[in-house]
Image (cartoon, grey):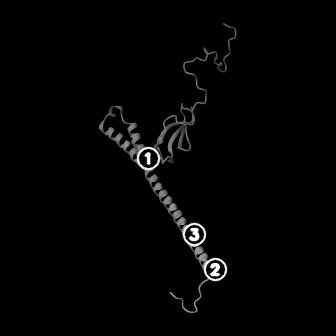
Amino acid sequence: MPKASGESTPSVEELQAELAQARQQAAEYLDGWKRAKADYANLKRETDARVREQWKAAGVSIAMHFADVYQNLQTALVHVPPQQAREPWVEGLRQVAKQFTSVLQELGFTLLTPTAQDRYDITQHEAVERVPSDQPVDTVVETVRCGLRFNGEVVLPARVRVSAGRSDTSPPREEGIDPAKAGHPTSPHKGEEVDRSGQ
């Protein structure tokens, strides 16, 4: 198509300048789009994390109440009279306790149930009382309420009674050993004299 009179043809330099400007704008638009995409990804990640934390908090709150109910069930089973251990209602309680465990596991929880003589661990246990005991000091004597882990993390420490050792501070006597025969004669009581005549 013939050009209109008076219309000049752009020079090569002008075309190169326009092309460079277009490329610069395209790079700016691409950079802005990348930043917007990264911002959206960060926002989505933060939102998802916040939602997960909210669900976790709600789940832990509910599970904590279930832990109390489960512990009450276990306490009831422990105190079942031996002559009634095979009764249908007792078996029913055992099945309910198993179902509690299964449901909690499906939700990502595992029960934390320390046993007697387990070492007291402040990261997993909450000591409610120190009691005299023949067990080693700082070992679990009794579990008052089970704890909970959520995906491997302790979210509810188990409440336990912890051994304070013997209430009698005297050294324990070895069972079956007579101190006199073991070569450790007992000291005389105050006011008594030791007969050294050999008679």
* Residue 75 figure quarter: top left
Q: What residue type is labelled 2?
A: Glu
Q: Residue furthest bottom?
A: 5
In percent of width and height, residue 106 lies at 41, 48
Report how far apart the C-alphas of labels 1 and 3 lie in the structure.
53 Å
- The residue lying toward the viewer, choosing from 42 and 82, is 42
Q: Which amino acid does label 1 sit on?
A: Ala
In this rendering, the answer to whether 100 lies above or below 27 is above
Which residue corresponds to mark 2?
Answer: 13
Taking the image as shown, residue 120 lies to the left or right of residue 186, namely left
Q: What residue type is labelled 3?
A: Asp
Which residue corresponds to mark 3?
Answer: 31
Q: Tell me whether the residue at label 1 lies in contact with that at label 2, contact meaning CB atoms closer than 8 angstroms.
A: no
If you read the primary sequence from the N terminus, does the residue marked by circle 1 or circle 3 appear first? Answer: 3
Q: Which residue is drawn at 42% across and 50% down?
A: 107
In this rendering, the answer to whether 46 lies above or below 10 is above
Q: Which residue lies furthest to the right in this view?
A: 196
> Of helix, strand and loop, which one carries label 1?
helix
Which residue corresponds to mark 1?
Answer: 67
Q: Which residue lies furthest to the top in this view?
A: 199
How crowded is the residue under tag 2: few (<14 C-alpha within 10 Å), some, or many (20+)?
few
Q: Residue at x 69, y 11 (%)?
A: 196
In percent of width and height, residue 62 lies at 43, 52
Q: Which residue is drawn at 58% across and 71% down?
A: 27
Report how far apart the C-alphas of labels 1 and 2 lie in the structure.
79 Å
In this rendering, the answer to whether 181 lies above or below 26 is above
Q: Which residue is drawn at 55% across and 41% down?
A: 121
